Image (tube, grey):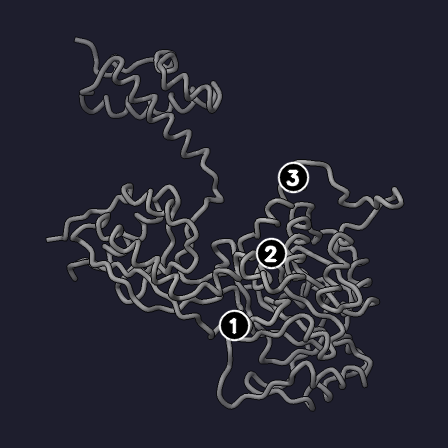
Amino acid sequence: MSKPSSRIPSVDEVLRGEIGRTAAARFGHAAATAAIRDELGKLRGVARDRPLDVAGADLATTVAMRALDALQAADAPGLARVFNLTGTVLHTNLGRALYADVAIAAATTAMRHPSALEYDLATGERGERDDHVRALTCELTGAEDACLVNNNAAAVLLVLAALAAGRDTIVSRGELIEIGGSFRMPAIMASAGTRLVEVGTTNRTHLADYAAAIGPATALLMKVHTSNYRIEGFTREVTAAELAPLARARSVPLVDDLGSGTLIDLARFGLKRERTGQEALSDGADLVTFSGDKLLGGPQAGFIVGRRDLVRACARHPIKRAMRLDKVRLAALEATLKLYRDPDRLAERLPALAALSRPKADIDAATQRLAPALATALGAGFRVAVVETASQIGSGALPLDTIPSRAISMSPAARQGSGRRIEQLAAAFRALPIPVIGRTHKGALMLDLRCLDDEAAFLAQLPRLAVSKASPA
């Protein structure tokens, strides 16, 4: 009697089958062969312990299907599309702002064709890549000049390195923030080679504190927006407008780091007011830094705007080249900035602002449409309800301010093992073809529909939700 392992097909036999040929055509002969060998090796390991109950052509087909599945999984993009139903609109871990259609079109053109990235079409000579957005940025902010880098942390680093290396930068102790990924403002300042001079206390800083700290080694006065927290109670902060006259009197440049940054009054869209880049310059700042991919709603970028001599010093610094934007983001950023010339239609055309200003009634209607489908998909093992909730702006913008919203809440029908069941449910949603990312709150998985922009795709994949429908005993 032959050994069980002798019934396992050869690599060539699997490759000659229809599915094997498909795998080779899609992923190449070498990759398909390697995947088939891997699956055959697993079968031989099983066959050493027990007889296989499938043989011949059926087994060859099974091996080919498993190999094809493995190849498809390995080929899937690591930067996967997801549904952001966390209730945080500008979610750092989920890509922050979505591009406007015009920005996507501009980026696509830049990817498909040669472009005048650093070429002056008027003179036929070498150009400067920031020129594509410099005039537009100055138009929208009122700045004398502007330069661009790859994010706001880079903008702050470049300003400090170019203007304050080896000298002192004065900052309020209450503004020494830590941003995402444990990056701290003091560490960024140290990396730039400037000496941090802290003034005031965590909760109270006065104008006299800044004045007393200014000396011969002072290079900059700096304001830092506490974008991801807020201190309340017995507090005192010196505003940029209050600090500017002191900076001018002592001939020390004032840098105002807005963090998220915006170019329009958000109050017109029903959101809380946030200082704009224009206002920061009007308040007397010599340089203002802010992000492109947060409230501004564009691609990741960092802006440095303000006095021409200071901006030019930043643009000439050697590390500017290491921080520059590529052609794709520059094209998308230019298209995004142009939308701000027509503020009346901005909420219709800018996805981030559309999500932030989406009417609660619209979100409520979506929850009413989708809740029954979720209840059917989950079965008797879970309770499904529509609940009041609050969305966050995210990415350090307006940290304590929320927007009324509605969510679908899913909780286990039985208390026993409810925590484990919620974890399993969240994992099942993440395992869908388009992963669904929600948030857990008080023993339930919550799906805030503020950012759901494709109901059809969401509904189409619910039958594939691999979670037990039965209520646990």
Residue 384 in the figure: left or right of residue 107: left
* Residue located at (32% from left, 49% from top): 429
Residue 265 in the figure: left or right of residue 147: left
Disc number at residue 298? 2
How far apart, in angstroms, are the residues tagged by discs 3 and 1?
A: 35 Å
Residue type beneath disc 3: Met
Q: Quadrant of the N terminus?
A: top left
The reply to whether dot 2 and dot 3 touch (C-beta < 8 Å) is no
Q: Nearer the viewer, mark 1 or mark 2?
A: 2
* Residue located at (38% from left, 12% from top): 16
Whether residue 168 appears in this view of the structure is: no
Answer with the quarter of the image where residue 171 lies.
Answer: bottom right
Relative to residue 19, is residue 77 depicted above or below?
below
Residue type beneath disc 2: Gly
Place of residue 271 in the rendered image (x, y in percent of width and height, measured from the top left): 51, 72
Relative to residue 225, is residue 345 depicted above or below?
above
Disc number at residue 111? 3
Place of residue 310 in the rendered image (x, y in percent of width and height, measured from the top left): 80, 67
Place of residue 17 in the rendered image (x, y in percent of width and height, measured from the top left): 35, 14
Classify mark 3: residues with Cα within 10 Å, few (<14), some (14-19) or many (20+): few
Residue type beneath disc 1: Leu
In depth, the one of 121 and 434 nearer the eye is 121
Disc number at residue 379? none
> Residue beneath label 1, please?
398
How far apart, in angstroms, are the residues tagged by discs 2 and 3?
A: 17 Å
Whether residue 425 appears in this view of the structure is: yes
SS at circle 3: helix
Q: Earlier in the sequence, mark 2 or mark 3?
A: 3
